[in-house]
Image (cartoon, rainbow, N blue to C red):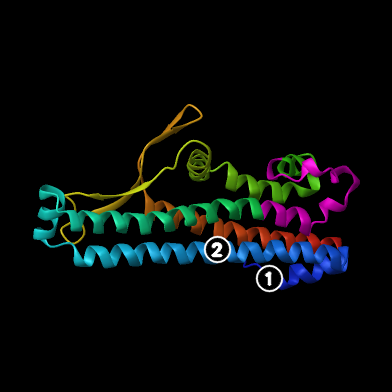
Amino acid sequence: MASWDAEKTRKLVRTLYGPAQLEIVRECISSTIYRQRYTRFHFKEIKKILGAYTGIHLKSEYITNSILIGNTKEQNDFEYCQTRIGAHIIAAVQSIYSLADILVYTAYYSLGCNLLRSSRKENQYSPEAIQIFFSKNIKYSKIKVILDSIFEHKEFKYLAALVNHSKSHGLIKATLWFGATGKPQNPYTLKFQVFKFEEKNYGNRLVLTFLENEYNRLSKITAEIGSTLNSILTINK
């Protein structure tokens, strides 16, 4: 997989469309970089908090006190751990979801599409409208195919449902489960709750596996988009 030479993209945009367009593209590229950094940060924090908590609280007497007897202090510790982890999970989910939209804008502005007379209406600047715009122009077909691989993938559809339900209906929490029959070294598991959105049911998902897989998938696609943009811009130069 080719990497994204972002500096080359910036130079090509400046040459083709001028410094004003470059500033727009520079901000988009910067946003993709920071969204990836934020996601990595939150993911590491989730694992660190979970590791520290389970490292202290895996003793059989703690499990008995907190789960069976209902010790208040240990229940409070458990809930506080879930709160900290939950905050990082929500932030990571939102960063991954936002990265997809930012990539649409990055492609749109890098190719100078906003400078075309046919796309100067403000209401055409939503990610959905930009995707429609790309679909109607065959010269953008390579970019459209790559972007489709983001939004049409079943895991991203789950992510979108998770974000939109949490935003408009109710927060889908990630719960720290204890399984007495789980692996002895770590019986704790993070799972997203089941939920229903737009008449479709979504089951439990393992949080760490889902976040890591979707982050890695979008990171590869980000590099692919950048490489493709540079190829198209070089031809147009």
Expressed as whole percent of the image width and height from the top left, the position of residue 151 reads 59, 44
Expressed as whole percent of the image width and height from the top left, the position of residue 137 reads 80, 43
Label 1 sits on what residue type? Asp
220 or 181: nearer the eye? 181
Q: Is residue 169 above or below residue 116?
A: above
Image point (30%, 59%), residue name: 81
Label 2 sits on what residue type? Gln
Which contiguous range is marked in magenta?
Answer: 103-128
Please tell me whether the stretch drawn in magenta is mainly helix, strand or loop.
helix
Image point (18%, 62%), residue name: 57
159 or 235: nearer the eye? 159
- Compared across the picture, whether 134 is left or right of 85 comes to right
Q: Secondary structure at mark 2?
A: helix
| The C terminus lies in quadrant | bottom right
- Compared across the picture, whether 30 is left or right of 217 comes to right
Expressed as whole percent of the image width and height from the top left, the position of residue 171 reads 44, 42
Cα–Cα span, label 2 and label 1: 16 Å
| The N terminus lies in quadrant | bottom right
The reply to whether the magenta stretch includes residue 107 is yes
The reply to whether the magenta stretch includes residue 67 is no
Image point (49%, 59%), residue name: 216
Occupied quadrant, residue 187 = bottom left
- Return the residue found at the far top: 199
- Compared across the picture, whether 61 is left or right of 195 comes to left
Q: Is residue 3 above or below residue 184?
A: below
Image point (19%, 58%), residue name: 73
10 Å crowding of disc 2: few (<14), some (14-19), many (20+): many
Label 2: which residue? 36
Q: Who comes first in sequence, dot 2 or dot 1? A: 1
Expressed as whole percent of the image width and height from the top left, the position of residue 143 reads 70, 51
**Disc number for residue 5:** 1
